[in-house]
Image (tube, helix red, strand yellow):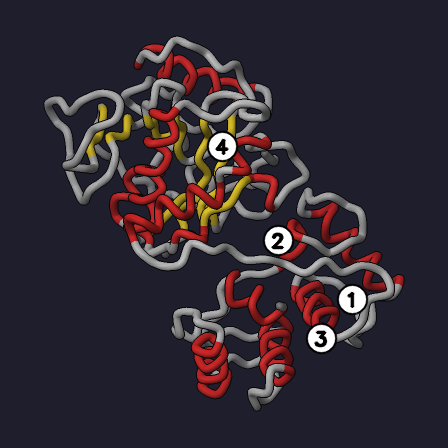
Amino acid sequence: MNPESAPLNPGRRTFLAGALAVGTGALLGPGPSAGVARAATGPVIADTTAWGARPPSSPINFLAGAPDKVIVHHTATANVTDYSQAAAFSLAQSMQTYQMDTEHWIDTGQHFTISRGAYVMEGRHNSLSTLLSGTQHVESAHCTSQNTVAIGIENEGTYTTVDPRSEQYAALIDLITYICRQYGLRAYQVYGHRDFNNTECPGDRLYALIPQIRADVAARIGGDPTGPVWPVLSSGASGENVRTLQYLLVQHGATLTVDGSYGPATQSAVTAFQSYTHASADGVAGNQTWSQAVAPLAYGASGSAVQAVQSQLVAHGIQVSVDGAFGPGTQAGVAGFQSSAALPADGVVDARTWSRLLA
């Protein structure tokens, strides 16, 4: 978790109180009652009013459009055997109290919480109403440098040496599937917290389940669940992948010569970037560094990250101008590369396209 920024957008919406059923299939947790809303297939989610949340201390920041990933966490609390709704609501209250009073965040950090008893609860206010709309999401505080682009899900318990309960896992799959459908995400866009920050979260056992989570979600929404795989670069490396790393570091504010040589300046820039993003600050560019450095790029984008894509396309034999402008030529080049790599040829450079360019 990380300190809050200061969200200022007052565009808060109110929504129905109580447990909101967003599905018509098998229901997890509390059943529907009077005043319940139903939308597309999904789990029952208790909103902040249902579990007795305090109001946020500052306005929630609303973000237009969809997030680009889902991040799975564990609460690192006891693996309790009280699976009741009352225990679930008590958990939600205690998490909000700690995060607001001790961490001094404006509200609960994560968007959603799943109890050991498989009750699904809204965390940060308006996470549910924006999910139901599919056109907005809210800024959160669950993963440093990812809080404006990722939906965070906390799973009650500690999953270092044991797996989640099967009922809790099933609720997680239901929730992620619904999130993917609402926001148009693909199954491989599911990650664990440690993919981005220097943390043990979501525990060794739950993190090891990420490929299975992707596969189980893909079984419902379709598509290839294979996630991105990143190269490991360190001092002394050279070549096109180092050039890509340098371009990305420049995009993130580093002052660096893009020369394809991983020398002391690049190592220093990597270490500074890792510290800033709460990744492991060892000067070696691996999973966390790449996961934090890349962001989706599409038609109309500009900057050194676009130059990184263009330079990679040229290295793959696709002739485009390395000018930092994502125009029609770059879009066509990306789509052509995606077709050759058996990826959806949508012309958008998402994390998996980035990783294939670097392969």
State the residue position of label 1. 255
Q: Earlier in the sequence, mark 3 or mark 1?
A: 3
Mark 1: amino acid: Thr
Residue at x 34%, y 25% (from the top left corner): 167
Q: Earlier in the sequence, mark 1 or mark 2?
A: 1
Residue at x 40%, y 19% (from the top left corner): 116
Mark 3: amino acid: Glu
The percent position of residue 16, horizontal first and vertical second, equals: 20, 31
State the residue position of label 4. 109
Going by the image, does 39 lie left or right of 327? left
Residue at x 51%, y 79% (from the top left corner): 326
Q: Earlier in the sequence, mark 1 or mark 4?
A: 4
The answer to the question of whether label 4 and label 3 lie on touching residues, with beta carbons closer than 8 A, is no
The percent position of residue 153, horizontal first and vertical second, equals: 44, 35
Mark 2: amino acid: Gln
- SS at badge 3: helix
Q: Earlier in the sequence, mark 4 or mark 3?
A: 4
Marks 2 and 3, how far apart in space?
19 Å
Q: Quadrant of residue 129?
A: top left
State the residue position of label 2. 292
Q: Give the position of the C terminus as an image quadrant.
A: bottom right
Marks 2 and 4, how far apart in space?
19 Å
